[in-house]
Amino acid sequence: GAGVSQSPSNKVTEKGKDVELRCDPISGHTALYWYRQRLGQGLEFLIYFQGNSAPDKSGLPSDRFSAERTGESVSTLTIQRTQQEDSAVYLCASSLAAEQYFGPGTRLTVT
Amino acid sequence: AQSVTQLDSQVPVFEEAPVELRCNYSSSVSVYLFWYVQYPNQGLQLLLKYLSGSTLVKGINGFEAEFNKSQTSFHLRKPSVHISDTAEYFCAVSDSGYNKLIFGAGTRLAVHP
């Protein structure tokens, strides 16, 4: 079946602009996660959605970052007033249980 | 708080040699442990996972890992590597009741002919 998909695959934006990144999880997966991977580093947890529970936002680095999820489907990660340090690959994952399935990521470059 | 330490940032090895990628974790609760692989310009793929039961876990592509609770380690091994194993390998941990993953910084495995 279809895996996790993310769009766009690449995004170049100017400093100060807002960006929206989209994630389509595997159908039926109740949990959805966003991670950030800076160049040469491991993944940092950003936010976690589980069903209708309140999301765990403990990993969001600043109030410029926010995310929404519609039911158990699409999620959007929004970064307002982008800064150069926001440049990274943003990865989405979904799961039913312990194993997370990752999308290909969105490479964000802030110039 | 949980954390993961991957002791080697880079591991060069010749083809058909054995390899071990080291991972240590810290956690005050039960853990689930994972190894993911990231091939160049690709997403993360699960290699193997430890949830409970046997401490020796076998995964895809001939990899295996051993959970050692007393040493808080989960080292990844392969007896004979191939050029195609060249990739970045990430160790990760999560709480037993919560699936947020905490990742190590990664180990770049470079297999040379």
Image (spheres, coloured by chain):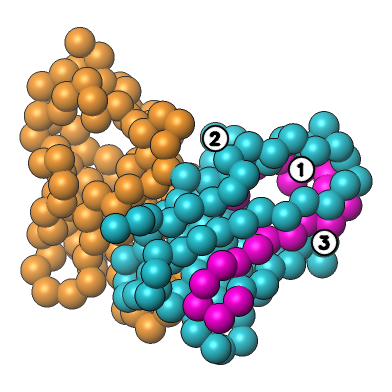
Q: Which residues are magenta?
A: A70-91
Vertical comparison of A15 with B69: above or below: above
Chain to which the residue tagged by mark 2 belongs: A
Q: x, y percentage for residue A48?
A: 55, 72
Q: Residue furthest right?
A: A16
Query: Residue A85, labelled with which disc?
Result: 1
Q: Residue B62 occupies which quadrant of the picture?
A: top left
Q: Is residue A16 above or below residue A22?
A: above
Secondary structure beneath label 2: loop
Q: Are marks 3 and 1 in contact (CB under 8 Å)?
A: no
- In the image, taking residue A35 as reference, residue A57 lies left or right, namely right
Q: Amino acid at mark 3?
A: Arg
- Left or right of A111 on screen, residue B70: left
Residue receiving disc 3? A64
State which quarter of the image contains the C terminus of chain B: top left
Q: Amino acid at mark 1?
A: Glu
- Residue A79 sits inside the magenta stretch: yes
Which SS class for mark 3? Answer: loop
Asked whether the beta carbons under mark 2 and mark 3 sit within 8 Å of each other, the answer is: no
Tell me what hue chain A is rendered in.
cyan
* Residue at (22, 65) in percent of width and height: B50
Q: Look at the numbered disc 1 and give the secondary structure of its residue.
A: helix
- Sequence-first tag of 3 and 1: 3
Colour used to depict chain B in the structure image: orange
Residue hosting label 2: A40
Label 3 – label 1 distance at C-alpha:
12 Å
Q: In the picture, residue B63 is in which quadrant?
A: top left
Label 2 Cα crowd, 10 Å radius (few <14 / some 14-19 / many 20+): few
Give the spatial CA distance, label 1 vs label 2.
Answer: 14 Å
